[in-house]
Image: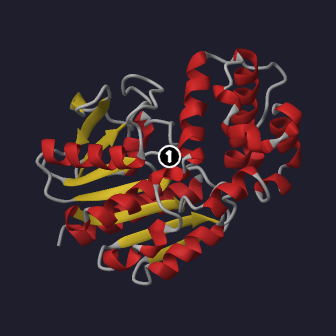
Amino acid sequence: MKQLHPEIEPFNTFFLETGSQHKVYVEQSGNLDGIPVVFLHGGPSSGTRPGQRCFFDPEVYHIILFDQRGCGQSLPFGELENNTTQDLIADMERIRKQLNIKQWLLFSGSWGSALALLYVQQYTEVVSGMIIRGVFLARPQDLDWFVREGASRIYPEAYQVLLDSMPGQNIELLYTTLWSGDEQVARDVTAAWMHWSSQVAVGAAYQRTDQPEAITQKMVDQVKMELNYARNHYFIEENQILENCARIQNIPTIIIHGRYDFVCPMAAGLSLSKALPQAEYRVLEHAGHIAQGDEMIDALVDASEKMAMRLAK
């Protein structure tokens, strides 16, 4: 089993100017002269973490992490104006150009996998390869699985908590209640959504504490961002990602999907592998959604090593 690389600190951090109110946090670590790789986090709204640098050999890779608009250390936190998928794609291009990178490897998971695929379809020539974990295709059916008929049948107890937070137990109100102006309702929905999302993402390892967590405004804003993307269909056309895969057939790609991923079910990974038949497709029989656990870490570190060998040629 391959292990994560030792923790490292960035050698440079800065805030990217976007031409709007948003300032995007960017950091660089590893080898400045190494293979450029950019990490695309999930959510939308989660932000990056220091441990995510550890998927890459710091002697081999020039590691770039950034917090998408309104996330993590980017400013202002939770801002929804001028915060769309196309804005995020434009930010990636700004980062690449500001760092004078000709081509970079995309390393992505969950929502980040959708962002990576949309970016490469628009800027194919600047992508040297892709490592995609937990395929999310951002289609209505993918969202329906998560919030209607799908994961709700696997974790009905947690889903009932989410339903109970909605006026009249109407799940259709999920995308409006946070904007209703009722602060208590917004906090109740936030708590229920965080419980639901964590249960589905973490699975059997998730333990809800008996002591209710204090819901802060920052938590509300974070959930608002996630649901704002969802209610706007992630600002893309239906099935846009799969329909545009023909233009990226020659991009070296490794797709990694956990059998027990109930956030982004296996069907999405299989669909992408069919749309990209030249890609390496790895199903992890005991892994779930998150980038943790021995099997998942082994696969991701192995993928970064394979790509390094391929791109160094």
Rendering quarter of residue 88: top left
State the residue in front, 290 or 86: 86
Instruction: Give percent across and percent down for residue 213.
Output: 73, 19
- Residue 275 visible? The answer is yes
Residue at the spot 40% in from the left edge and 75% down from the top edge:
245
Instruction: Give percent across and percent down for residue 39.
Output: 36, 48
Residue behind mark 1? 42
Task: Describe residue 250's horizontal placement relative to residue 164 as left or right.
Answer: left
- Residue 284 visible? The answer is no
Q: Amino acid at mark 1?
A: Gly
Instruction: Give percent across and percent down for residue 142.
Output: 64, 60
Task: Describe residue 5's horizontal placement relative to residue 23 as left or right.
Answer: right
Q: Quadrant of the C terminus?
A: bottom left
Depicted 188 relative to depicted 176: above or below: above
State the residue in front, 180 or 92: 180
Circle 1: element type: loop
Rendering quarter of residue 253: bottom left
